[in-house]
Amino acid sequence: MSEDRIAQFREFNRFHTRLIGALNEHLLASDYTLPQVRVLYEVANAPRKAPPSARDLGEALGMDTGYLSRIVTGLAEEGLIDRVPSDGNAKRLALTLSDKGREVFKGLNDASAKEAATMLEGLSDQEQRELIGAMWKVRRLLGNGTNEATFILRDPEPGDLGWITYQHGRLYAKEYGWDWTFEALVAEIVGQFAKTYDPSCERCWVAEREGEVIGSVFVVRQDDDTAKLRLLYVDESARGLGLGRRLVEETLRFARAKGYKRMILWTNDVLVSARRIYEAARFELLEEEPHHSFGKDLVGQVWGRDL
């Protein structure tokens, strides 16, 4: 492990500690410490029908049992937390907020939200999205390690179309060995879409996760009755999220709403994962033809389905 990386990791921890005021004796200009506020938060946000015990809190927060017990006892002595025997187990004390506890927590929660808003308001909308995305990424990498489906679908913004073109060229060169002429084709399709875009019957969806573009798809007009799905793209980092299926579902929903009667698409037989998505969406293979493109011998395919 690089010593420089370890040092940078520790530096970020020190920065975050200062940022949230974890070193202060009290949090949010209140009479309570950070651990006390966190315990109140967990109790306040627990399911009403399943209030936690001290042991539950200790497991959820990773806190020493004795330390947590002293915090809970202190909050109970101040009248903020009630400890009530659980139904069917008198030895298990369920923790809930008292009326005073709910009032105190509301004040703390409002102050925390205001503090967060103050930090965010100096950032542009794009910077806020990048920051929140980076936070999600930290949680994913250092948390439970699962590939959470935390993506959003939105309309394209400046810079997206160029990024989509680049990502297509990069991905297909890496995974299929296609040359730069494929990227040129994507650029032509994207450029034509932008030049002749008709919002009444065409659309592009951009998938974003953690502030980064991870997928996209286009629907363009073929004729009055036929919509064409183009350039379905899912980044390798986003596989397993169901993103490809979701993007295709959005195109079908849009096409139906706009009155199209059928949808078609063109792909190649080597794109097995994409073909599985189309088959799952009830597309059928209509025709195929060998061709030499992008530096490879391929079999082009036309798929379609009624709407």
Image (cartoon, rainbow, N blue to C red):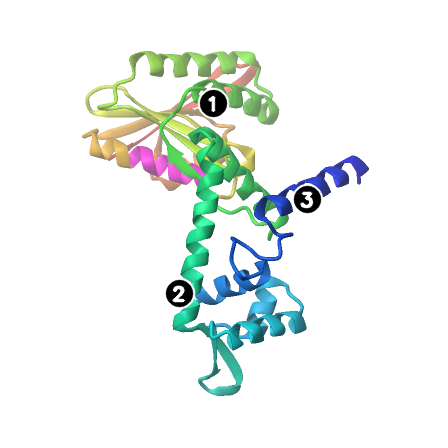
The answer to whether residue 251 is left or right of residue 116 is left
Looking at the image, can residue 45 be seen? no
Label 1 and label 3: CA atoms lie apart by 37 Å
Read off the residue under disc 2: 103
Foreground tag (2 vs 3): 2
Q: Main secondary structure of the magenta part?
A: helix
Q: Are marks 2 and 3 in contact (CB under 8 Å)?
A: no
Residue name at image x 45 percent, y 14 percent: 187
**Eyeballing the image, is 266 above or below 41?**
above
Region rendered in magenta: 243-252
Foreground tag (1 vs 3): 3
Read off the residue under disc 1: 164
Is tag 1's residue or tag 2's residue first in the polypeptide sequence? Answer: 2
Please, what is the three-letter code of the amino acid marked with disc 3? Arg
Q: Quadrant of residue 300?
A: top left
Q: Is residue 14 magenta?
A: no
- Assign the C terminus to one quadrant of the image: top left
Relative to the observer, which residue lies in front, 17 or 199? 17
Under circle 2, the secondary element is helix
Q: Residues within 10 Å of mark 2 (few under 14, many from 20)?
A: few
Q: Residues within 10 Å of mark 1 (few under 14, many from 20)?
A: many
Q: Is residue 248 magenta?
A: yes
**Eyeballing the image, is 217 above or below 296?**
below
Under circle 1, the secondary element is helix
The answer to whether residue 282 is left or right of residue 257 is right
Q: Are marks 1 and 3 in contact (CB under 8 Å)?
A: no
Read off the residue under disc 3: 14
- Assign the N terminus to one quadrant of the image: top right
